Image (cartoon, rainbow, N blue to C red):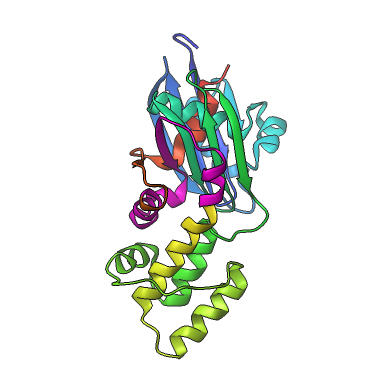
Amino acid sequence: MADESRVGVDLGSRTTKIVVLKSEAIVHADVFDTTPDPLPAIREKLAPWAGLPIRATGYGRRMLEQELGARVITEIKACARGAHHIRPACRLVIDIGGQDAKVIRVRPDGGFEDFELNDRCSAGTGRFLEVMARALGYTLDEFCREAMQADRAVTVSSMCTVFAESEVVALIARGEDRRRLALGLYQSIVDRVHPLVARLETEGEVIFCGGVARSRCVASLLGRKIKREVVVPPYPQILSALGAALTD
């Protein structure tokens, strides 16, 4: 893209991410909630950058193609490209967002070699964490902090968000410790994504991104499970928007 300026938009199920690049350097980034009618907010956010080419990815990419004339980039391709730009030694990306989880094997040139995807339900995703935090009476920040202080995890057998919420409520009613439950729920997320990681095992750096990567508890448990360092970039939510903007 040389000296060209571009905008990348990742219209996700829970949040929308915007990255503005000039000569491959980030000059602006924004993350905000995706509403049932996301276009007015996106148009307002993009107004200062009117006229720049737009690359769109995420669940709502086809809407942005139709309404804004954006070029569409697949989520897998965008995420791999963004991770490679931030960490060129990256060879595996674990992306857990609001409604799905992806694991991507990245080539040395930033393209993707293979991927595994769990998008059949919200179990083990950001939406799952939101529901479980509410069931335990925590904010998301408290949920992570309290889990990391637990002396052991209590196993929650249900992975379906609806059934897990009912199980947690029942365990609380029986007097189970909320911190231990919180740690058990975080561990269940890691256990669910681990088979995807195992199928794509490779050398090189492992990057953890997406909204769930903001949880230090998940990152820590994930590193222990796969017995490797897991790198969380400073702004883990914007990698796909960044990668979309970088893609020709």
- Of all residues shown, which one is farthest toward the right? 66
The x and y percentages for residue 20 are: 45, 27
- Of all residues shown, which one is farthest toward the top? 2
Q: Is residue 178 magenta?
A: no
Residue 218, above or below 114: below
Which stretch appears magenta?
194-223
Nearest the viewer among 212 and 195 is 195
The C terminus, quarter of image: top right
Q: Residue 70, can we see it?
A: no
Residue 142, above or below 217: below
Q: In the image, what residue occupies the spot 36% across and 42% down? A: 228
The x and y percentages for residue 203 are: 43, 31
Nearest the viewer among 123 and 225 is 225
Q: In the image, what residue occupies the spot 53% across and 63% down? A: 128
Q: In the image, what residue occupies the spot 48% across and 37% down? A: 93
- The secondary structure that dominates the magenta segment is helix
The x and y percentages for residue 120 are: 68, 54
Residue 210, above or below 174: above
Residue 63, above or below 226: above
Q: Is residue 201 magenta?
A: yes
Nearest the viewer among 16 and 79 is 79
Tally of numbered discs: 0
- Of all residues shown, which one is farthest toward the bottom? 174
The x and y percentages for residue 17 are: 49, 39
Q: Residue 64, can we see it?
A: yes
